[in-house]
Image (cartoon, helix red, strand yellow):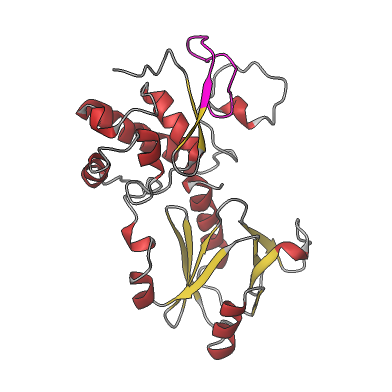
């Protein structure tokens, strides 16, 4: 699933390509979007800005219209110059926004809705999002209070709650806990103020490292020596995620994995670097 860093970079690229331009063509595979386009055409509107909020991507059009998308597991936005061949088959196309120079194509995006500012304020998720890790300045006191409010929850689950902190997905969850030396199955209530501070600092630092200009594609939390000949192996750039059974990069212990939470998400940790008790 794309995490906050991916959505931020996508929004930044779309904003640079589209902001301030006029829509010359619009196409979608979704009937609700088509109905809006038929009643109040998207063509002719100016794209005012594109931004991310946690894992949501928002495209603002003139005339108080906002396209809200969420990638879930496999969605993505691509940008092409007009006439350029798409990298994916047309059967995966869900939305196309054309300008004089570019085509923005949403492939396999499962959630796509049009909103006005008023209806967006009533959205069941977006207005309730916690502080966004992709923002340059993290509102730490708000994030700290929301995390403390999850006292009975395991920290691994709490970090995935977008109402606590926006942008963390399953990869960052495991990596943040490892970097902080905190067992992901500990209850939030058991964490000290220093540990909460460490989690917030690490969360923001890792996210910012992955949204900076010219950051490599894919999440990178580990940049030291690697014991793999597969340069394209995503696990080679991570401390623990998807490294079950491998040696810990710090202490040599065997990385473990266990399912966590109602969605049974995979959680990885080092039993030596991340003890069950502080």
Say if 81 sits above or below 75 in the image.
Answer: below
Q: Residue at x 39, y 19 (%)?
A: 274
**Position of residue 64 in the picture relative to residue 238 (left or right):** left
Say if 81 sits above or below 240 in the image.
Answer: below
Q: Residue at x 56, y 82 (%)?
A: 42
Residue segment shown in magenta: 240-257
**Position of residue 238 in the picture relative to residue 66 (left or right):** right
Q: Position of residue 247 (x, y in %)?
A: 57, 13
Can residue 59 be seen in this snapshot?
A: yes
Q: Residue at x 55, y 42 (%)?
A: 214
Q: Residue at x 61, y 25 (%)?
A: 236
**Position of residue 200 in the picture relative to residue 246 (left or right):** left
Q: Position of residue 159 (x, y in %)?
A: 38, 40
Q: Position of residue 170 (x, y in %)?
A: 49, 39
Q: Position of residue 230 (x, y in %)?
A: 72, 25
Check residue 252 for magenta coloring. Answer: yes
Q: Quadrant of residue 155?
A: top left
Q: Which quadrant of the rendered structure holds the C terminus?
A: top left
Check residue 70 for magenta coloring. Answer: no
Q: Nearer the viewer, residue 216 or 246?
A: 246
> Looking at the image, which residue sits at the far bottom?
39
Magenta part, dominant SS: loop
């Amino acid at each position: 699933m794309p995490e906050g860093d991916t959505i931020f970079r996508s929004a930044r690229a779309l904003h640079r390509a589209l902001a301030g331009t006029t829509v010359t063509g619009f196409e979608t595979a979704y009937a609700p979007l088509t109905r809006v386009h038929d009643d109040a055409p998207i063509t002719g509107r100016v794209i005012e800005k594109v931004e991310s909020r946690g894992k949501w991507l928002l495209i603002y059009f003139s005339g108080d219209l906002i396209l809200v998308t969420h990638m879930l597991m496999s969605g993505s936005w691509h940008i092409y110059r007009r006439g350029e061949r798409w990298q994916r088959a047309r059967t995966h196309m869900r939305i196309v926004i054309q300008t004089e120079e570019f085509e923005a194509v949403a492939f396999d995006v499962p959630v796509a809705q049009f909103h006005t500012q008023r209806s967006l304020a009533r959205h069941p998720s977006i207005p309730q999002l916690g502080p966004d890790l992709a923002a340059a300045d993290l509102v730490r006191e708000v994030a700290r209070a929301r995390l403390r409010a999850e006292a009975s929850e395991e920290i691994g689950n709490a970090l995935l709650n977008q109402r606590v902190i926006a942008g963390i997905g399953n990869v960052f969850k495991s990596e943040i806990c490892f970097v902080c030396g905190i067992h992901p199955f500990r209850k939030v209530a058991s964490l000290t103020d220093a540990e909460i501070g460490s989690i917030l600092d690490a969360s923001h630092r890792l996210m910012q490292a992955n949204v900076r200009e010219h950051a490599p594609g894919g999440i990178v939390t580990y940049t030291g020596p690697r014991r793999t000949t597969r340069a394209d192996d995503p696990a080679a750039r991570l401390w623990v995620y998807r490294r079950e059974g491998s040696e810990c990069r710090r202490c040599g212990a065997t990385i473990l994995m266990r399912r966590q939470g109602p969605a049974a998400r995979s959680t990885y940790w080092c039993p030596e670097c991340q003890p069950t008790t502080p």
